[in-house]
């Protein structure tokens, strides 16, 4: 996959905290994708810590796919897909797992206000069960990582194809 | 929020189950009986000493990398307190020369990142009347862009000296894995010069914000560095005469469990509540600020001591000027070290490390055995030290706002908490807010 410096068309960002159990799901999905290796036009990165740094991560990209853990009350392991390209997702993101001052949804909306958001923004969230301190995913979350990685990869490819021809 | 009996009832509860714009998530609960404030609780749920337990049995060299994971906002603070403690345990001191300068430079980068995040994105919306940074950005895009530009300068320092922008990987006991070259550091000059200019503008802008009257009473406690503004070393001093070495921390400061929080509350054995952080550092060491920061503070009318917690936004801006200025000075004088680290040989013993995280004093204590295995670890973050002071501040805010409707009182309480920039992710996990006047 592309190095972030080669100005990829699509950036896939796993967001989370590796020491908060299921909060690591997004990071784990990106690691899984990296292990598979593919596609020059897709860059992969993992983002831990405060979320404003995301604005730097996706600058220059035409599309971004964010992968994060979500706590919304759904069955653990459920995969959510939200398209944030055109409208705010705040109301549809009831339980961001972020333990930081600004959540992923706020980083997206802040970027939108500042006109620093890629043209296409898709968020994949996997429902977590355990966000306590500690490492290792819950079994039902771990069991979905392959499917999550597949979905994210498919999304990134279709975004790359859709945006590649743009001037 | 709830008011089950209406405002005419005797009991009133104000609660917020999710506190916006603090680092992490937490809760506040205030219960009024008539016009008496019966209970004020800042609820902090700490992972039960997870990291201290994780450290036991690990090598002494692993402490900086493990503790850096405690907080995504202030990983350098954790690294710096841990390396100081380990070096102390092993009888090594890195108090002069380029390695110490690099450590201070890295720490300046973290202060710049953390303070610019708080000043612009978390605190400014309270003064300008917005729910948050996103809403503020709609009408004050320039302010938000300034914040991002400052933060980027801090990021650049973190990335170059720390190896990457979050959870730096270049810090080790004894120094660094790689020391940057002089020419590499020179690339930071231009962004830091711009950041310093922006920080000076920020002080002027922040000084003009409307500040409610408020005064914090607790003892102010900070490190005291004989030669510099307190960042990476020093004795622990207070405005009421405390003057101790970091290894005397336990004799003077006790941590207690309280029922409503799994985080420990720290207090001075002799006098109780104290406050660490920007207001304390400024009160105890403003004479050590770099000249441009000192001048900016004077022009902003801060005086020698500032006890109004709302004005902490001005003090953070002054510290931003200082951090940029000191970073530039270090870069200007930098000579590459002969080696990126000094050798540290483990020995059986106990070590203490205290440094100034952006939010205040961060104390680490480790006991290691002769081969460097960690036998015991103790970490006291600034937010758990400040928790009693924040609760006292909240009580005063509620007492002064008894006639406000719940929604306004709740907002004022949230603002009071944000004044202290609590890092809930260090001290805690979830935080939620409740006012009860049933």
Image (tube, coloured by chain):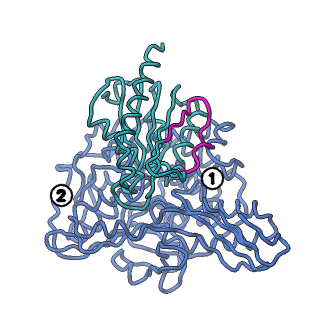
Q: Vertically, is B204 above or below B232?
A: above
Examine the rendering and report whether any part of residue B212 can be seen: yes
Left or right: residue B265 versus residue B9 is left
Between disc 2 and disc 1, whose residue precedes? 1
Q: Specify the colour of chain B.
A: blue
Q: Vertically, is A82 above or below A157?
A: below
Q: Specify the colour of chain A.
A: cyan
Magenta-colored stretch includes residue A131: no
Same chain, labels 2 and 1: yes
Instruction: Please tell me which residue is depicted at 36% across the width and 56% down the height of the picture.
Output: A19
Instruction: Please tell me which residue is depicted at 26% across the width and 43% down the height of the picture.
Output: B180
Instruction: Please tell me which residue is depicted at 48% across the width and 45% down the height of the picture.
Output: A51
Which SS class for mark 1? Answer: helix
Are the residues at dot 2 and dot 1 in contact (C-beta closer than 8 Å)? no
Q: Which mark is residue B342?
A: 2
Magenta-drawn segment: A80-95
Quadrant in which residue B34 is drawn: bottom right
Quadrant in which residue B434 is drawn: bottom right
Instruction: Please tell me which residue is depicted at 71% across the width and 58% down the height of the picture.
Output: B211
Left or right: residue B202 versus residue A27 is right
């Amino acid at each position: 996959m592309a190095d972030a410096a080669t100005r990829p068309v699509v950036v896939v960002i796993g967001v989370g905290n590796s020491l908060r159990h299921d909060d690591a799901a997004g990071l784990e999905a990106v690691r899984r994708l990296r292990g598979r290796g593919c596609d020059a036009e897709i860059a992969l990165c993992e983002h831990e810590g405060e979320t404003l740094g995301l604005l730097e991560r996706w600058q220059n990209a035409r599309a971004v796919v964010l992968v994060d853990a979500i706590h919304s009350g759904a069955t653990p392991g459920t995969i959510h897909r939200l398209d944030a390209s055109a409208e705010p997702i705040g109301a549809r993101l009831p339980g961001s797992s972020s333990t930081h001052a600004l959540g992923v949804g706020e980083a997206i909306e802040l970027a939108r206000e500042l006109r620093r958001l890629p043209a296409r923004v898709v968020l994949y969230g996997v429902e977590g069960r355990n966000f306590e301190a500690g490492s290792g995913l819950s079994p039902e979350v771990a069991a979905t990582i392959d499917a999550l990685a597949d979905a994210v990869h498919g999304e990134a490819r279709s975004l790359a194809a859709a945006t590649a021809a743009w001037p | 929020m709830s008011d089950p009996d209406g405002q005419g009832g005797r009991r009133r509860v104000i609660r917020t189950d999710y506190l916006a714009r603090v680092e992490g998530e937490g809760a506040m609960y205030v219960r009024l009986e008539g016009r008496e404030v019966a209970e004020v609780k800042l609820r902090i749920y700490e992972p039960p000493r997870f990291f201290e337990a994780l450290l036991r049995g690990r090598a002494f060299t692993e402490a900086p990398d493990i503790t850096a994971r405690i907080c995504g906002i202030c990983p350098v603070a954790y690294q710096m307190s841990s390396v100081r403690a380990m070096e102390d345990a092993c009888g090594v001191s890195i108090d002069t020369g380029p390695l110490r300068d690099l450590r201070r430079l890295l720490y300046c980068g973290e202060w710049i990142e953390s303070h610019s995040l708080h000043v612009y994105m978390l605190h400014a919306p309270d003064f300008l009347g917005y729910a948050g940074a996103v809403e503020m950005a709609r009408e004050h895009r320039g302010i938000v862009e300034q914040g991002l530009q400052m933060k980027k300068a801090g990021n650049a320092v973190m990335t170059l000296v720390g190896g990457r922008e979050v959870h730096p990987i270049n810090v080790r006991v004894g120094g660094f894995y790689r020391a940057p070259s002089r020419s590499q550091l020179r690339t930071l000059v231009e962004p830091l010069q711009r950041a310093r200019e922006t920080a000076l503008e920020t002080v002027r802008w922040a000084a003009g914000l409307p500040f409610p009257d408020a005064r914090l009473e607790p003892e102010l406690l900070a490190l005291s560095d004989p030669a510099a503004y307190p960042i990476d070393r020093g004795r622990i001093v207070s405005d009421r005469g405390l003057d101790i070495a970091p290894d005397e921390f336990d004799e003077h400061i006790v941590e207690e469990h309280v029922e409503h929080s799994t985080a420990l509350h720290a207090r001075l054995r002799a006098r109780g509540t104290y406050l660490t952080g920007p207001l304390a550092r400024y009160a105890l060491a403003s004479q050590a600020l770099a000249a441009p920061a000192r001048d900016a503070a004077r022009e902003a009318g801060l005086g020698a001591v500032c006890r109004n917690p709302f004005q902490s936004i001005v003090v953070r801006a002054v510290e931003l000027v200082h951090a940029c200025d000191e970073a530039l000075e270090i870069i200007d004088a930098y000579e590459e070290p002969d080696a990126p680290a000094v050798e540290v040989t483990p020995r059986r013993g106990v070590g203490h490390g205290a440094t100034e995280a952006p939010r205040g004093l961060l104390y680490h204590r480790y006991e290691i055995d002769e081969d460097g295995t960690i036998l015991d670890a103790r970490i006291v973050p600034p937010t758990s030290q400040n928790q009693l002071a924040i609760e006292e501040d909240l009580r005063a805010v509620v007492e002064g706002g008894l006639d406000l409707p719940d929604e306004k009182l709740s907002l004022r309480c949230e603002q009071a908490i944000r004044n202290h920039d609590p890092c809930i992710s260090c001290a805690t996990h979830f935080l939620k807010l409740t006012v009860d006047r049933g």
